[in-house]
Structures are given as C-alpha cells and as structure tokens.
Image (cartoon, rainbow, N blue to C red):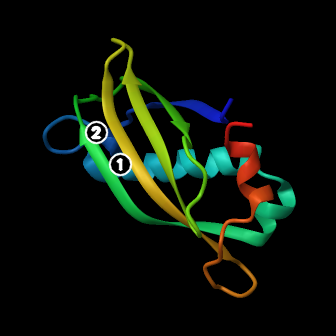
Amino acid sequence: MSSTYITHFTAAPEHIDMLGHVNNAVWVQWMEQVATEHWTRDADPAHVDAYVWVVTRHEIDYRGNVRQGETVSVRTWIPDGPRGARFDRHMEFTGSDGKVKVAAKSTWAIIDKQSGRILRVPPDVSAPFLDN
C-alpha cells in the first residue's frame, strides 16, 4: 500500500479572504505544509538531511468553500513512481460534510542540498512512498 498522510486544518481569521472563505493562496501554503510533513514523517532521516523538494507545477480544483472556524481533513498520497527527478503528489481537502472542497495534483522535483542540482530520484528515496 502506498504511504498516505492525513492531517487537519481549521480556518483561522488570517486564512479568510474578503469573500469570507479560505483564500486560494492559503490552500497552496497548506499543500506545501502537508507535503513537507509527509516527507519528514516517512522519509529516512538521512534523506531528509540530503535532499529538498521543489514544486514545478500545481493543478488545483476548487470545489467548495471553507469559512472561518471550519475544519478540513487533508489526505495526500503519491500514486505512481518518479519520472526522472519528478513525481506527482495528490491531495484532497474534505470538509466535515464529507465533500471534497479542494483537490490538487502537484509535481515535485528533488534537489541535492549539497550540490544544489536536480537529480534522478533514487529508488531508496521513493520506496517508502510507493506501493510495494
């Protein structure tokens, strides 16, 4: 089974835009936070020290609004192995009503911290996040 990470966010006043719901930029910040938490939870600590990930693309579908005080559950997973230096991460933010409020797919690339260069994802780095 692929590694899945689940967490929750509650919309605070600073997350709300002039329309009264979570601002689009906040969703992107939450996506980065969730991806980082998943990486640090499941990756080998030596890999966390050696590599960093950067986003190369986001695809986001906004399907519903979340207002101040409402909580969403977010689930992230990586359905397929890497392609060279990149892989796709999926996320779904679900409201207390059981409806997906935001669905996203982001493409991430790995960078070697020491050299600062993009590299092909090593198999032992991707292994904890994929189907066995």
Query: At numbered mark 2, what does the secondary structure look like: helix, strand or loop?
Result: loop
Q: In this view, does 115 lie to the left or right of 36?
A: right
Which residue reaches farthest bottom? 115
Residue position for label 2: 22
Vertical relation: 32 (above or below) 108: above
On the image, the x and y values in percent for residue 69 come to 36, 25
- Looking at the rendered image, the quarter that the C terminus falls into is top right
On the image, the x and y values in percent for residue 21 come to 23, 35
On the image, the x and y values in percent for residue 3 come to 67, 36
**Residue type marked 1:** Val
Which residue reaches farthest top? 97
On the image, the x and y values in percent for residue 32 come to 50, 53
Mark seen at residue 26: 1
Vertical relation: 106 (above or below) 117: above
Q: Residue at x 71, y 78 (%)?
A: 113
- Looking at the rendered image, the quarter that the N terminus falls into is top right
Q: In this view, does 58 lie to the left or right of 53?
A: left
Q: Is residue 103 left or right of residue 125?
A: left
**Residue type marked 2:** Val
Q: Residue at x 54, y 49 (%)?
A: 33
Q: Which residue is drawn at 67% across and 66% down?
A: 121
Q: How many numbered discs? A: 2
Quarter assignment of residue 110: bottom right
In depth, the one of 73 and 43 nearer the eye is 43
Q: Residue at x 62, y 33 (%)?
A: 4
Vertical relation: 84 (above or below) 72: below
In space, the residues marked 1 and 2 are separated at their CA atoms by 7 Å
In depth, the one of 23 and 68 nearer the eye is 23
Mark seen at residue 75: none
Which residue reaches farthest left? 19
